[in-house]
Amino acid sequence: SQTIHQWPATLVQPVGSPLSLECTVEGTSNPNLYWYRQAAGRGLQLLFYSVGIGQISSEVPQNLSASRPQDRQFILSSKKLLLSDSGFYLCAWSMGRLQETQYFGPGTRLLVL
Amino acid sequence: AQTVTQSQPEMSVQEAETVTLSCTYDTSESDYYLFWYKQPPSRQMILVIRQEAYKQQNATENRFSVNFQKAAKSFSLKISDSQLGDAAMYFCASLGNQFYFGTGTSLTVIP
């Protein structure tokens, strides 16, 4: 069966520091991968998605970037964090077309102080 | 662009009773899918149920069922025989070329 991992689970970072969140999927090949952000009390906002290694689509221009160095690895990064980057970050995967069901990881809670 | 609206920020239900969560959506896509996800306090998003828009038959998963009204663009979730473990945030989502999520409904189950 497929599993998706995210780490760290919780992160507290000062403003202006760099960020690297990692997501890996097991048990499948060539998945579509997604990064979402969930602000407190709100729905999910799609940040990036990837249909293959090195292929990144950005949905929201912002302080963040994403990379996919390996087939089942998806990384969310920032060079300098802003207070507004605080939130809950979820990674998800799906198979086949982008219209397939997405399955979510456990998430990373990021607090920027 | 697609929009998903959940007009009930909070709902409550007595244990063993039935509750219906509302969702409306707007899309210009002809081929799309609809979902309900559950987010318990652990905050991991868990798929509850999925509906293909081209199917007229309402999807059902055990105690969870939907009332899909395509013309009205309505997609409500019915939870029967509510259990304490059903307490969570519930998000409605539509999927055309990408996911659009509603703002969620917080469900409380009263023992």
Image: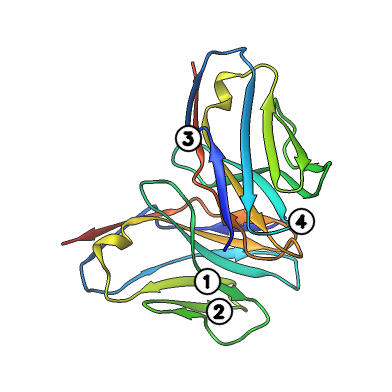
Q: Are marks 1 and 2 in contact (CB under 8 Å)?
A: yes
Q: How far apart in space, not on screen, are marks 1 and 2 (Cα)?
A: 6 Å
Identify the residue position indicated by label 4 in the image.
A30
Among all residues in the image, which is located at the extreme left? B111
Residue type (three-letter) at the residue carrying disc 2? Gln
Identify the residue position indicated by label 3 in the image.
A9
Q: How far apart in space, not on screen, are marks 2 and 4 (Cα)?
A: 35 Å
Residue type (three-letter) at the residue carrying disc 1? Phe
Q: How far apart in space, not on screen, are marks 4 and 1 (Cα)?
A: 31 Å
Residue A3 shown left or right of residue A97 in the figure: left
Q: How far apart in space, not on screen, are marks 3 and 4 (Cα)?
A: 25 Å
Q: Residue at x 52, y 71 (%)?
A: B75
Nearer to us: label 2 or label 4: 4
SS class of the residue under badge 2?
strand
Residue B43 placement (x, y as % from top left): 43, 46
Identify the disc placed on residue B37: none
Identify the disc placed on residue B69: 2
Q: Residue at x 27, y 70 (%)?
A: B82
- Neighbor class of circle 2 (other Cα within 10 Å; few <14, some 14-19, many 20+) is some
Q: Where, by quadrant of the figure, is residue A29 drawn?
A: bottom right
- Neighbor class of circle 4 (other Cα within 10 Å; few <14, some 14-19, many 20+) is some
Among all residues in the image, which is located at the extreme right? A54
Identify the disc placed on residue B75: 1
Q: Earlier in the sequence, mark 1 or mark 2?
A: 2
